[in-house]
Amino acid sequence: MAAAAAPVWFISLAGLGAVYMSAVFIRLLPFLCHCFHRPKDLRRCYGSWAVVTGPTTGLGRSMAMELARRGFNLVLIDLNPDNLREVSETIRETHGGVQTKTVVFDLSLVGTVEGDAAMRLLRAAVEGLDVGMLVNNAAVAKPGALYFHEAEVERLVTMIRVNAAALTEVTAAVLPGMVKRGRGAVVNVGSGSTVAAPSFPLYTVYSSTKRYVEQLSRDLYVEYKSKGIDVQCQVPFYVHTNMLSSAIKAGMWLPGFVATADDYTKAAVRWIGHGPLSVPDAGQQLQWFLAAFVPDFAHNWYRLRKHLQHRATLWNLK
């Protein structure tokens, strides 16, 4: 007797599951293929100078040190002149022969008279330099986990200025030189909040600014690829930096998935020039892969619950 045919609904669900699984595994293919590529000589490919915003702490400092190790001269942009002087001296002492320039620029003042003056200083600093790379790293995450109505509007506006408006203006200042030379790379630091979850409640404005960074990067990648310029949004998940608040650290249940700034940066530099979006760290790539199996409603429930815990911790610290 012939075996009974499987029900149509079962075949349909199995087909949908196979398509979904294929899409998820395809996401891993670029990462697996990249592991077998030899690292690029970024200085030779793009140019001898790199511009880095927010280079005095965390990922920005690690990125500046790593680029200096690879032979890049650096234009460093930060709001604190003492911190700029310290990191500049450390780079020159650690990597002999590397040149540095510093620009004091409070990115929260972009669009103001003071911000316009600082932007003119930046344009003057890069004038005539073979700027091959721009790393837009500077960002503001505070005030942290709060309902939208609880946050001071001024703090939210500052976040938008630094994370979105300043990134746009700095890119607009550096990009024309790359176009003229026919080569370059723009690396924008995004956030795992925009790729691994459908929402990021209580960090709403922060994740919204990072969504802007991701979309800007994707569009500029298409716009400038034919001109020899690689634009990429690099997406860190949790990394041990000052951006990681005590509230988040207290709620960590898988601390092994949190990369150090130096380890993350070493992986990140290897990914420059490989596509418009990158999750460089292997552990964080795995998190991204696993997150794709979770339905949106579960993401939303978990994120709201977890971020309410962050909020409670913040209030208790006050």
Image: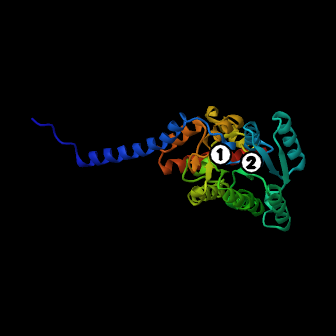
Q: Residue furthest top?
A: 256
Q: Nearer the viewer, mark 2 or mark 1?
A: 1
**Residues at discs 2 and 1 in contact (Cβ within 8 Å):** no
**Which of 175/107 is in front?**
175
- Neighbour class for label 1 at 10 Å: few (<14), some, many (≥20)? some
User: Residue 29: horizontal and vertical position, in percent?
Assistant: 47, 40
Q: Secondary structure at mark 2?
A: strand
The circle drawn on residue 45 is: 1
The answer to whether residue 5 is above or below residue 125 is: above
Q: Residue furthest left?
A: 1
Asked if residue 134 can be seen in this view, the reply is no
The residue located at (82%, 38%) in the rendering is 97
Lower position in the chain sequence, tag 2 or tag 1? 1
The mark total stands at 2
**Which of 164/197 is in front?**
164
Q: Residue furthest right?
A: 82
Disc 2 marks which residue?
Answer: 50
Q: Is residue 81 left or right of residue 281?
A: right
Placement of the N terminus among the 4 image quadrants = top left
Real-space Cα separation, disc 2 to disc 1, in angstroms: 12 Å
Say what amino acid the circle numbered 2 marks: Ala
